[in-house]
Image (cartoon, rainbow, N blue to C red):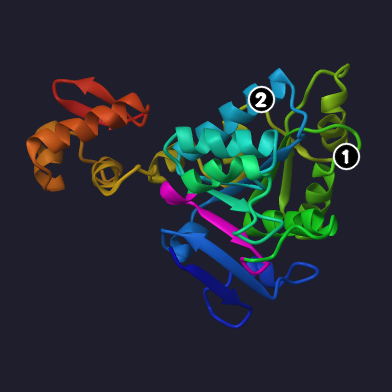
């Protein structure tokens, strides 16, 4: 797979990244998908503590999965803890996710997440870095610099769990400077891993107790959620999902318009149902989950 390099000049360079400080002069992108299509989708950067609690793990997986299932791209930093949980939840939901790296593609960090990085690419997401592919992790500042890219790419930043001095708060500050909405999940007031998120809410961050809060910030109504096409794991699934989004619900019509053979269509529909993307309505009628 080829690495695509974007510089400040081409029109496909994300506009929001032209305004961040310091500006990103170049981006290296590894993806099997259309870069412009990825950037055009609604997106949320989901971040938080590396030492995540059971509560943080649960809310991160739930919120990231629900967002991804509704067509929102999940952006994070591939780090241990909340980052990797958010990426995996998006993948499990059949959605798209982008990992912003503090190093080059040849030096995935942490090394234990190479498999996760590979899965992100295989499912249509992307790895993004402002460093050349052979750049190792040389400076601690790379991690903080990575955070300004992660916040610059998204429509809103969601922090699901963070301690009082969490490095995650750097991303919240970048988001505020960039004019992005900061959202935070409230936690137990006796839990040190929620002190940071609770403080953000006291300082004006939008509290999030359900995906409805996030969709409101993104300007997507309940109806708007369904109009954001969920992402299939392969072209056959995407064809069927696009037909459902377009209003086709009859099973026979879906099979005919998809131009899939009956066995392939039935297998595709079954996999979409297993993955929670579609549901039977009865009488051979189908709808999005």
The picture quadrant where one finds residue 182 is top right
Quadrant occupied by the C terminus: top left
* Residue 271 % position (x, y): 28, 30
Quadrant occupied by the N terminus: bottom left
Above or below residue 84? Residue 57 is above
* CA distance for labels 1 and 2: 24 Å
What stretch of residues is rendered in magenta?
121-133
What residue is rendered at 52% in x and 55% in y? 126
Q: Residues within 10 Å of mark 2 (few under 14, many from 20)?
A: some
Residue 288, disc: none
Count of number-bearing discs: 2
Above or below residue 84? Residue 289 is above
- Residue 132 among those drawn in magenta: yes
Side (left or right) of 204 relative to 118? right
> Pointer 1: what residue?
203
Asked whether 248 or 164 is in front, the reply is: 164
The picture quadrant where one finds residue 57 is top right
Asked whether 224 or 21 is in front, the reply is: 21
Side (left or right) of 200 relative to 55? right
- Residue 208 among those drawn in magenta: no
Label 2: state its secondary structure: helix
Q: Residues within 10 Å of mark 1 (few under 14, many from 20)?
A: few
> Pointer 2: what residue?
57
Check the image and name the residue furthest to the bottom.
9
Label 1: state its secondary structure: loop
Above or below residue 194? Residue 20 is below
Residue 69 at least partly seen? yes
């Amino acid at each position: 797979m080829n690495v695509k390099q974007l510089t400040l000049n081409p029109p496909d360079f994300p506009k929001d990244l032209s305004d961040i400080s310091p500006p990103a002069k170049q981006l290296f992108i590894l993806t099997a998908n259309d870069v412009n299509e990825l950037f055009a989708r609604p997106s949320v950067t989901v971040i938080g503590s590396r030492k995540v609690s059971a509560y943080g793990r649960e809310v991160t997986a739930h919120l990231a999965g629900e967002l991804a299932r509704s067509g929102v791209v999940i952006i994070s930093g591939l780090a241990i803890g909340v980052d990797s949980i958010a990426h995996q939840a998006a993948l499990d939901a059949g959605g798209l996710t982008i990992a912003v790296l503090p190093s080059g593609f040849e030096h995935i960090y942490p090394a234990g997440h190479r498999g996760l990085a590979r899965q992100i690419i295989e499912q249509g997401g992307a790895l993004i870095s402002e460093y050349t592919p052979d750049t190792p992790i040389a400076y601690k500042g790379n991690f903080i610099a990575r955070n300004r890219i992660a916040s610059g790419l998204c429509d809103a930043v969601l922090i699901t769990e963070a301690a009082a001095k969490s490095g995650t708060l750097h991303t919240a500050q970048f988001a505020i400077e960039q004019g992005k909405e900061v959202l935070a999940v409230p936690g137990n007031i006796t839990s040190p891993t929620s002190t940071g998120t609770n403080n953000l809410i006291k300082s004006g961050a939008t509290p999030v107790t359900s995906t409805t809060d996030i969709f409101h910030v993104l300007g997507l109504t309940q109806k708007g959620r369904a109009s954001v096409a969920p992402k299939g794991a392969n072209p056959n699934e995407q064809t069927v999902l696009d037909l459902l989004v377009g209003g086709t619900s009859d099973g026979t019509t879906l099979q005919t318009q998809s131009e899939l053979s009956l066995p392939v269509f039935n297998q595709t529909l079954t996999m979409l149902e297993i993955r929670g993307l579609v549901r039977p309505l009865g009488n051979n009628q189908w709808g999005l989950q």
